[in-house]
């Protein structure tokens, strides 16, 4: 995945606990509304060292996005990005 610019996770995912870290070209991830937790695998954060990362498309509402359990420092390695939900955007 190190050369991917965009990754789409399929419906049914409940937890993201391993990352896309060290993917220097990654710009966008599409996350299904079924996700309930964003964690990490103990070695690196989900988006660690993804300098081009700018966007999540979340297939749920802003309220659902805010309800997802997110590990501390889950977005380490990014310089800020936007989460596009079905009813609005969230800046992270």
Image (cartoon, helix red, strand yellow):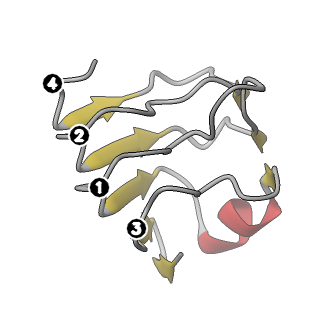
Q: Tag 2's secondary structure?
A: loop
Which sits earlier in the primary sequence, circle 4 or circle 3?
Answer: 4
Image disc number at residue 24? 2
Residue under circle 4? 3
Which sits earlier in the primary sequence, circle 3 or circle 2?
Answer: 2
Residue name at image x 16 percent, y 37 percent = 5
Q: Are marks 4 and 3 in contact (CB under 8 Å)?
A: no
Residue under circle 3? 84
Q: Tag 4's secondary structure?
A: loop
Q: Tag 1's secondary structure?
A: loop
Which sits earlier in the primary sequence, circle 1 or circle 2?
Answer: 2
Counting other residues with Cα less than 10 Å from the Cα at mark 1, is it few (<14), some (14-19), or many (20 or more)?
some
| Quadrant into which the N terminus falls | top left
Q: Position of residue 22 (x, y in %)?
A: 37, 32
Q: Nearer the viewer, mark 3 or mark 2?
A: 2
Q: CA distance from mark 3 to mark 1?
A: 19 Å
């Amino acid at each position: 995945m190190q050369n991917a610019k965009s990754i789409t996770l399929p419906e049914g995912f409940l937890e993201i606990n391993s990352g896309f870290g060290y993917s220097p070209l990654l710009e966008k991830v599409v996350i299904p509304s079924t996700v309930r937790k964003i964690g990490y695998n103990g070695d690196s954060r989900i988006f660690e060292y993804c300098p081009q990362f700018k966007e999540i498309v979340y297939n749920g509402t802003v309220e659902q996005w805010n309800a997802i359990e997110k590990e501390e420092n889950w977005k380490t390695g990014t310089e800020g990005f936007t989460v596009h939900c079905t009813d609005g955007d969230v800046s992270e």
